[in-house]
Image (cartoon, rainbow, N blue to C red):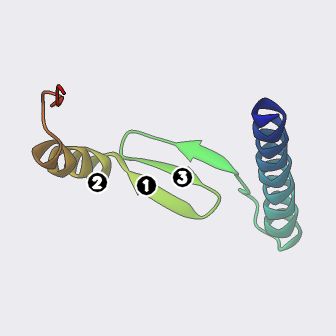
């Protein structure tokens, strides 16, 4: 039963993402934007729709999180 629910959720996320991508592309291209790109990347950033994610920001985030997360897992034996 849990596998069916997970499969339905995955299909729903994929369908929602595809629908949003088509709507974004159509809105940008009909709005006279010649370079309507859903996904784009270069040496400094990755962009999805109108969101830009810079590689430097991602590496800074990973560095900050790695200081918080322990390097070795701790277990409690009973």
**Within-10-Å neighbours for mark 2: few <14, some 14–19, many 20+:** few
Q: Are marks 3 and 2 in contact (CB under 8 Å)?
A: no
Where does residue 11 sit, x and y in percent of width and height? 84, 40
- Residue holding disc 3: 47
Q: Quadrant of residue 1?
A: top right
Residue at position x 79%, y 43% in the image = 14
Give me the C-alpha separation between circle 1 and circle 2: 7 Å
Give me the C-alpha separation between circle 3 and circle 2: 13 Å
Q: Are marks 1 and 3 in contact (CB under 8 Å)?
A: yes
**Closer to us: mark 3 or mark 2?**
2
Tag 2 secondary structure = helix
Q: Are marks 1 and 2 in contact (CB under 8 Å)?
A: yes
Which tag, 3 or 2, sits closer to the chain's start?
Answer: 3
Left or right position of 38 against 57: right
Where does residue 37 sit, x and y in percent of width and height? 70, 52
Q: Nearer the viewer, residue 64 or 70?
A: 70
- Residue holding disc 2: 57
Depicted 45 relative to depicted 6: above or below: below
Q: Quadrant of residue 77?
A: top left
**Within-10-Å neighbours for mark 3: few <14, some 14–19, many 20+:** some
Residue at position x 16%, y 51% in the image = 64
Residue at position x 15%, y 31% in the image = 74
Where does residue 78 sit, x and y in percent of width and height? 19, 27
Residue at position x 54%, y 52% in the image = 47
Q: Quadrant of residue 32?
A: bottom right
Left or right position of 5 against 74: right
Tell which residue pokes out farthest to the front in this image.
78
Q: Which mark is residue 53?
A: 1
**Within-10-Å neighbours for mark 1: few <14, some 14–19, many 20+:** some
Which tag, 1 or 3, sits closer to the chain's start?
Answer: 3
Where does residue 59 sit, x and y in percent of width and height? 25, 44
């Amino acid at each position: 039963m849990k596998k069916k629910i997970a499969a339905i959720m995955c299909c729903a996320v994929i369908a929602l993402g595809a629908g949003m991508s088509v709507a974004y592309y159509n809105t940008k291209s009909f709005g006279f934007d010649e370079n309507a790109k859903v996904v784009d990347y270069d040496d400094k950033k990755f962009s999805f729709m109108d969101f830009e994610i810079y590689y430097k920001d991602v590496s800074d985030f990973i560095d900050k999180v790695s200081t918080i997360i322990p390097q070795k897992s701790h277990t409690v034996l009973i």
